[in-house]
Image (cartoon, coloured by chain):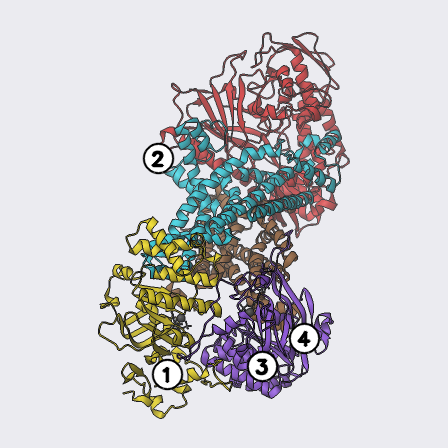
Chain colours: A purple, B red, C yellow, D cyan, E brown
Amino acid sequence: METSVLAEVKHLKMYFQTEGSFSFRKKYIKAVDDVSFKLFEGETFGLVGESGCGKSTLGRTLLGLYQPNEGKVIFEGEDIFSLKSKRMKELRKKMQLIFQDPSASLNPRKTIADILNEPFHIHNVGSKEERQKKIKELLERVGLSAYYLSRYPHEMSGGQKQRVGIARALALNPKLIVCDEAVSALDVSIQAQVINLLEDLQQEYGFTYLFISHNLSVVHHICNRVGVMYLGKLVEIGNHEDIYYKTLHPYAKALISAIPHTDPDMQRERILLTGDVPSPADPPMGCRFHTRCPQAIGLCSQAEPALKEVYSGHLVACHRAYHP
Amino acid sequence: GCGGSKDAATQPDAATGPKQLIVALDPDYETFDPGLAYEAYGLLVLHPVYDTLMQFEDTLDNPVYGIAESLEVSSDGLSYTFKLRKGIKFASGNPLSSADVKWSVERSMNLKGNGAFLTDGIAAIETPDADTVVFKLKDPDASFLTKLTYNAFGVVDRKLAMENGATNAADASTTDKAKLWFDTHSAGSGPYVIESYTPKVEVVLARNDHYWGEAPYYDKIILKSISDPGTQVMMLEKGDIDIAFNLGPEHVKQLADKSGITIKKAQSMTLTFLLMNRDPNIGGPIANPDVQKAIRLALDYQGIQTIAGEGSITPVAPFQEGFLGTLPPRDPKTAQDLDKAKELMKKAGYEKGFKTTLEVATLAVEGMDLPTLAQKIQNDLLQIGIETEIKTSDIMVALDPYRKGTQALSLWYWGPDYPDPNTQLAFLPGNSVGLRANWTAAMNPALAELGKKAAVEVDKETRIKDLQEIQKMMDEDSAFDVLLQHARHYATRDNIQGAEYIDPYKINLVKVSAK
Amino acid sequence: MSNEFKPLQDDDLLRINNLNVQFRTAEGVFKAVRDVSLSLRSGETLGIVGESGSGKSVTALSIMNLISNPPGEVAGEIYFNGRDMQKLSAEEVRQVRGNEIAMIFQEPMTSLNPIHTCGKQIMEPLLLHKTYSRRDAKAGTLELLKRVGIPLPEQRFKEYPHQLSGGMRQRVMIAMALACRPKLLLADEPTTALDVTIQAQILELMKDLRQETGSAIIMITHDLGIISEMCHRVVVMYAGQVVESGPLKELIRNPLHPYTEGLLKSIPAITKVKQRLHSIEGTVPSPFNMPRGCSFQPRCSYATALCAEKVPDLSQVAEDREVRCWRHGGE
Amino acid sequence: MGLIKYIVRRLLFLGFLILGVSLVVFIISHSVPSDPVLANLSQRNIDNQEMVETFKAKWGLDKPLYTQYFIYVGNLLKGEMGTSIRTQRPVLEDLKKYFPATIELAIFSMIIAIFFGMLFGIISAIKRNRGIDQVIRGISVLGVSVPSFWLGLMFLLIFYAKLGIAPGPGRLSPHLAPPAAVTNFYVIDALLEGDWELAWDALQHLFLPGLVLGSFTMGLITRTTRSSLLEVMSKDFIRTARAKGLTEKMIIMRHALGNALIPVITVIGIGFGNLLGGMVLVETIFAWPGIGQYAYKAAGNLDFPAIIGVSILISINYVVINLLVDLLYGILDPRVRYN
Amino acid sequence: MLLRMMKNNLLFSIGVIVCTLWIAIAFVAPVIAPYNYLGQDLANRFQGPGALHWFGTDSIGRDVFSRVLVGSRISLVAGLVTIILASFIGMIYGGIAGYIGGLVDEIMMRLSEMVMAFPGIILAMTIAAALGPSLYNTLLAMVIIWWPNYARVMRSMVIANKENEYVEAARSLGASHFRIFFHEIMPNSIGPVLVLATLDFGNAILLFSGLSFLGLGSPPPAPEWGAMVADGVLNFNYWWIGTFPGLAILTMSVGANFIGDSLRDFLDPRLRKEI
Ligand SMILES: Nc1ncnc2c1ncn2[C@@H]1O[C@H](COP(=O)(O)OP(=O)(O)OP(=O)(O)O)[C@@H](O)[C@H]1O
Ligand SMILES: Nc1ncnc2c1ncn2[C@@H]1O[C@H](COP(=O)(O)OP(=O)(O)OP(=O)(O)O)[C@@H](O)[C@H]1O
Ligand SMILES: [Mg+2]
Ligand SMILES: [Mg+2]
């Protein structure tokens, strides 16, 4: 694993206003609430958690697509939210996003050639011929033939569309790619193809991935480090073995124990959580997980645990996990 | 009607129900305050309700006594002394006295309503005793007695009126609060009282039991507002109404062979005319007197009369048949002379013709649609090379440029303010209507002079002579082309009698009865 | 609960013979299900896996006679409890639905009527199929709500679907399906829309209820993990056909069809050593453009000339094991 | 809480709306080349400077435009809408007089439109693509396509003049006197008086104009009910209902209809709005003494206090109907209710 | 597609045939009209329908049939112009409101709602009274009445499309607002608005004829159908004067609506909610 930091997120807070603009008392959804972590160059960082816990929001804020309420994102030493828009546009080339729904992320009225031309057009890169050559190369890189250049997205299968999405992200030679549920909508057999492709590309070009997924098996397969989110907060960060085999946070434990296994013989203790995820508009006091936590103690409902490094590179936010 | 059964729609049986007369009309009245009302249909309602000193019986050239018993006019024509009939009571039971007369006229004067100009000539009103009223005039006025027939001189029960906020004070126009009350109530001594008024729907008149004269035939008169003449026809045919008052010539034709219906025809006092501006800056080629003459010769009067309907005529000048001294109308068959018209156009330098705009208000005059007539004129003018574009506008919008005199060529109508030829002198050069065509006195000084003379002439014979001379002069040179004096068409059920047309009243409702 | 294999017997609860379903659409006739045969005993749980569009849902809907015609046309025999569902009158089918066979759908939000309370919707089958009075039905409903683990049943009874979370809604769906104690429960991807922790809760619940009621279950999913946790036997579908079926353990340990094999290998799992995933190249063929011969042949690494020529039959290779592949007989 | 807040917001908007509407009319009617003075004084009095001054002072026409507007708004806040130049009555009085006639007709035609519209829509959806569906769709399209002024004319010609099976124009047969004004709805007032014959007569007079006025809305409702019901029938929860073993009839009545009605409510709201616009035409044909005719005359006479009055009234009406529609939404759709 | 729809849908085919016929008539009207539509003949006024004058003659002896034929041009043009202008304005306005969102959206939508709350016909009448009735002023009034409908649909489309991931993709590539709006959002939002506009054609014709019935259209002697019906009301006892132009309005708007109705059924159900 590389050790140089590519991006660092510091105390990031991203709240969404829910009431209309004329309303007197404003309400907020705390989608991301005081999150800090680092992304190292060349690694794949997995972000897991239940639906609505703020994974996508975190990913997008990291790319500067949302203006956060508080906090910083340092990308290659620059605080992206303090940049001029021209410099920001430059920076955009280095950060890309791959989406969950391959059909929704491609404009249905554009041909594949148009879609892939877009990054070059926006950043005014190369001449017409050069662009055409680059587009063909891109398609090849993601394993599609030039035949598809004049196709429209709806004429392609889900896996093929996702490849086009990846090709677009690759166009400007980025350093960081945020994969937001990039394989979740795909069938198992296609999913494997795309995962392999992502891995191959990383091998070749040394990308850094922020890999957002709720599929813990996929994350297990692809990621070097993993962060577990719950209700807008990171509750555990660690490398792959730490999270899966030396799990500290009770929520992460439950999450991992809930994964169904293909092996019918496997015996396991399943931790069943009770109740549902509370609303991010109105999170519980203290530790946000204490309402569902099987190990909660009195302290949990009063004080919010901080994310602390327990072992080297293994951070957790749980009162009971600090002194294992 | 009750979905199929016809009986409820027909007249209620006179033997069982109260006797009522139902009239359908398209009225323009907005108020029944006698001091304010000055709409064409105002007197239809107000004449049966408010007594006046003078009134019309059968003809317009001869007003007769209303509640006056006798009249003395001073030799200088400036003082009119009326004796009132004795023992007259208002519908409220209050007695009527000369003070009521004075109060009422002063109120009209001070309200400054649209009809207030009728009182303009009055210098003072005196009431030497309860039965005597004396009007002092500023100048002699040949039409004063005619003016007295209007509701501005209607006698109001001043006690009752004052109880309801009325005043005759000089600042009445702002302090009088009785208008709303007058709309649905009445304070008169006439044969009827206003029982109810629902705007756009109906006015109901009920018999006044205190009436001093002979009691009228009907217990109730209902005046229904039905703006569409076609609907009036249908309702009359069904027997839903007794009189359909606003019919066009074509509706009458349709009713001609229907049983149970009597068609009535009368000469209306309404004129339709073409205004041709004399100001070259406004009228352009139209301002040329030769062009104006050519236009007068180019029109197909017979066709125009066909459109206006049977009974309409084309006076020589803006003086109606029925008034003192009016010349016989044009012969529609020979009035058109295209050759001469073209010659005149050539003389004026417009042999090839020109383009202009014909302005017309969207409304019907005596059942004739003005825009339709405009299309006919457009067609006729094309024959001498004048190409017109018709511009329609709502009457209230069209009135503005008309009154300001900024229309080049426009189609208008005119009803006399009171039934006397003096009101028509407005058309003369330098006078109000003449000026709307920018026809100044300087353009025809002789005519203007003669007009001034005729206005104050008291001798009947000389007056006739002057008036006829005026008409002849206007035939030669005029900024107007009088197209039509309309006929008035209406129809009644067969069993109605006495529904004769008389202009300011339209119909004297008091005289209508069943056969 | 045991995952032991039970041999087929003549008193199968459900037997489907040569089911064919096609849809007439604007683009042409679309064969969604081709020659599917399967059977199910009382108390047994059968899993159906396959890629999206392989005809899993259509098969389940056919059992309930819920394919509307037009555009759908169903051919074949579906024996439930000895009666051919295809031959029943509309009224008889109605009697079976919700009563003897019940169904849980994938998307609990859209599958519940947004304008009726949950209680009302759960009560409906009770009032319809059982001679319950309103009050009994309500009591029964509250009991059901309790059984599917919904806290505060009295309050939830009055609430509308949108007021519940996804997991709660799915519990309501389950309660509704179980209301009349059906002999057969069709669960069409009951947990796909849910989060892992909630999914685990629902799966546990279904296991408990199965034990309690003894219902047979057909579990449709594309997640082999769920299958191996829940089912006794598995049917694998590909492009509208059954390509393999057999008892769970045997099928997982020894997949015979190359598709099944590929599928198992391409699933990343935390039990596996991290290595490059196996992947089945290519995509599922378009139903309008089915390859000649075996429909999996274009993606199959073992394909031979024969595979591109002739469609293999579903052949029995062992007792209760069938596979549609030329490498295993096929004839 | 949310509901009250919502209603308060709506009412705030109403205030804003009234200001806007009055401003717009004010500007239009004052940018007119012609002058209300000329339009409303008699030919004689125009020449009389004193008369003109009196008139102008009375209507505040001698003051600058913005002052006139502030005067107007000030009066509006006091609940006064000024006096109509044409009728010389307080606008509020006029509106009180004419509006009930319009509303009575509008409500009646809405009832017809809603009843037949929904009935036809449901039949049409159930019998989709059969003969009856085609017929109903034909009727509904005719309903939205027919020019109301022409239909009114034809109806009168045929049913009143030729066949004599319908009463003529107006609110009552000419020989009948209107009932004592309580609600100003003749049918209701007549019933209050216990005069059955009068009520029946008034009801009959509602029929033809009601039908003409409602035809457009009926077409709209039919169309929406049909498509909405068809859409709902393809929803997942209908499949759930089928899986429960409900009969088709029960499915439609219990599960489909309630959901299908939600978009229909919007259309009913829109329809009611349209209705008041269409009034001008229908009232003219049927000599109906309502707000439409009043507005028509007012516009023609540039009687701006009256125009503003009518516009405000109709705008308020629009907002109120929208509010009602939204509240109805809440009743029909719990998702809205609990938000 | 047209033919396939026509085969399956009786009403649609009727609509297509009727509309095609009217459009054809509008093109050749002056040629095929048996008489000059302005030609007066007072001797032959009020002739009933017969061999010489199929639809009879009017109050100044013009041939009603010829006038109805020529009148189709005005109606078609009025409908087209209104719809095109109104949808254009509405699209821009709604697009901007939807894209910017927030307070701007709120204010812009309240403003458009104000126009919608405003009684349309009264607005038209006031405008006509103020500026004088003419075709232009009437069309102006119609556009003013109509555009908010399109603004609303456009706005909701833009708001829906704004959330699409391909828009986010463009943004993450660094595309400008201009580019996002015109390249990504507009092309995908315009469709339903255009469809709605096509479907509205019949309604526009109907409104126009209503206004010209009230005397707010082009001045005479233009053969406007609504004005001709008004003429028929005036000359009520000659039924043909008003009946035939009325039927012309009816058939044209029925034709347009038959097509519209069928299209509506055929197209995206999403649109249904917007209407
Ligand atoms: N643009 C937005 N406006 C308002 N609220 C938002 C917005 N985007 C996200 N949210 C809310 O913020 C919270 C976090 O959303 P986010 O999409 O980041 O979750 P997630 O972890 O990605 O969930 P999922 O797994 O479902 O994608 C959710 O409650 C969501 O409703
Ligand atoms: N009503 C219908 N009309 C036309 N085609 C249909 C219809 N219902 C299903 N299909 C088609 O039949 C095929 C099989 O569909 P089915 O729903 O059974 O797939 P599935 O295996 O359940 O997939 P998924 O995992 O996505 O639910 C699909 O391609 C689908 O498009
Ligand atoms: Mg997400
Ligand atoms: Mg499915």
Residue type (three-letter) at the residue carrying disc 1:
Ser
* C-alpha distance separating marks 4 and 2: 88 Å
Kindly indicate whether the residue at mark 2 contacts the one at mark 4 (C-beta within 8 angstroms).
Answer: no
Number of marks? 4
Kindly indicate whether the residue at mark 4 contacts the one at mark 3 (C-beta within 8 angstroms).
Answer: no
Q: Nearer the viewer, residue E216 or B237?
A: E216
Same chain, marks 3 and 4?
A: yes
Q: Is residue C81 left or right of residue D60?
A: left
Kindly indicate whether the residue at mark 1 contacts the one at mark 3 (C-beta within 8 angstroms).
Answer: no
Q: Up-down: is C79 above or below B239?
A: below
Residue type (three-letter) at the residue carrying disc 2:
Gly
Residue type (three-letter) at the residue carrying disc 4:
Glu
Disc nearest the viewer among 2 and 1: 1
Disc nearest the viewer among 2 and 3: 3
Chain bearing mark 2: B
Chain bearing mark 3: A
**Disc sitting over residue B137 in the figure:** none
The residue tagged 1 is C295
* C-alpha distance separating marks 2 and 3: 90 Å
Residue type (three-letter) at the residue carrying disc 3:
Asn
* C-alpha distance separating marks 2 and 1: 75 Å
Q: Residue at x 55, y 33 (%)?
A: D97
Q: Position of residue D228 (x, y in %)?
A: 43, 56
For the N terminus of chain E, the image quarter is: bottom left
Same chain, marks 3 and 1?
A: no
The residue tagged 2 is B4
Helix, strand or loop at label 4? It is strand
**Disc sitting over residue A224 in the figure:** 3
